[in-house]
Image (cartoon, rainbow, N blue to C red):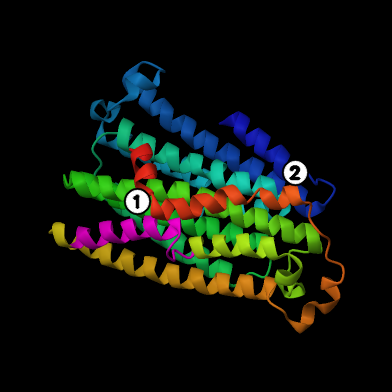
Amino acid sequence: MELMALTAYCLVSFEHEQPETRQAGVLYFIMSHIDAGCIILGFLLLFQASGDYGFASLHGIGAKMTPGKRDAAFLLFLLGFGIKAGIVPLHIWLPAAHPVAPSNVSALMSGVLIKTGIYGLALVCFEFLGPPPLWWGVTVLTVGTVSAVLGVLYALMEHDLKRLLAYHSIENIGIILIGLGAALMFQHSNHTALATLALLAGLYHTINHACFKGLLFLGAGAVLHATHTRNMEEMGGLAKRMPQTAFYFLIGAVAISALPPLNGFVSEWLTYQALLQGFGTTQSLMRLIFPLSGAMLALTGALAAACFVKAFGITFSPNRGARTLRRHTRWLPQCALAWPSSPALVCFSGFFRPRLFSCWIL
């Protein structure tokens, strides 16, 4: 994890001549070491109970820990992996690092690096810490809901294309955490089938987000290469000059807006199913959190669609403010235009053949 953080710092700081890049690199470096410290402290609590540093000895180790130490380990892991994933309010490094990093690095960070936080949190919660108390699931579900709503609201206010995509990464991490939080609540109440459904929805959206967000960042990189600006207000009419880029960006925009027939719809639909069924199968007042979270998820989906109507419309549709800029648009080589075809294909296959991905996840 430390090697990954150092490598990501070097990649973020690639264009270190610019002050904004250096500031973003330092911020990421500091936050990555804070999350590493939290994770190390959490594992030290687990190792104290197991007496062994092997992962095999940590399976179900939570049963041997006192409730106080188990809760402390959960909070440390939530903070550590939450910083890595970019949850609100620990997200400050993410909208700073993504815009200044090279676009292929942004695609890698959004598709892989922040997903290690999701993987780590799922691993320790479902494998190491044992049966969760109710408040663990409520906490994760609440953090996920807040991250999803605030992430898309921040994105709506942005005019920087890459920073807009960065905030949508926060939004989608929130959607993933909604699934994980619901799975923890179902596991607490011994609803194994619903816990499996919610966990599958969260992990499936993890894969889907890696695909369509990589596609969007590659499209944004092509636009940045052609126009030398991230400000969408200075763009316009690029669909005529860059039709392939516009087509691939449109596929990613439809997928991230959770519209059929693309993969984002399937994973969010599974999340809705888990939340709606949770209301009817739990008896306490806590069941009200499921429809509330589902309503916020629906609001998030609508706002995401509106945001990408704005992003695609301003960037690629004609507007009078971009006449001068279009004359200086540079063409991309054909090999660069071929790269986004793979994630675009996965966005379609994730809808028509979801069984392939769900079997691989399970």
Which residue is rendered at x = 52% and y = 56% of the image? 170
| 265 relative position to 234: left or right | left
Nearer to me, 37 or 254: 254
Residue 278: x percent and y percent? 21, 58
Mark 1–mark 2 distance (CA, rounded to whole Å): 34 Å
Nearer to me, 56 or 31: 56
Residue 280: x percent and y percent? 15, 62
Q: Quadrant of residue 279?
A: bottom left
Residue 340: x percent and y percent? 63, 51
* Residue annotated with mark 2: 13
* Residue annotated with mark 1: 201
Three-letter amino acid code of the residue under disc 1: Ala
| 303 relative position to 93: left or right | left
Mark before the other along the chain sequence, 1 or 2: 2
Closer to viewer: mark 1 or mark 2? 1
**Mark 1 element type:** helix
- Per the picture, the main secondary structure of the magenta-coloured stretch is helix
Q: Quadrant of the N terminus?
A: top right
Boundaries of the magenta span = 257-279
In the depicted structure, whether residue 339 falls above or below residue 219: above
In the depicted structure, whether residue 28 falls above or below residue 259: above
Q: Quadrant of the C terminus?
A: top left
Three-letter amino acid code of the residue under disc 2: Ser
Which residue is rendered at x = 56% and y = 40% of the image? 34
**Mark 2 element type:** loop
Name, please, the residue furthest toward the top.
52
In the depicted structure, whether residue 291 falls above or below residue 214: below
| 118 relative position to 178: left or right | right
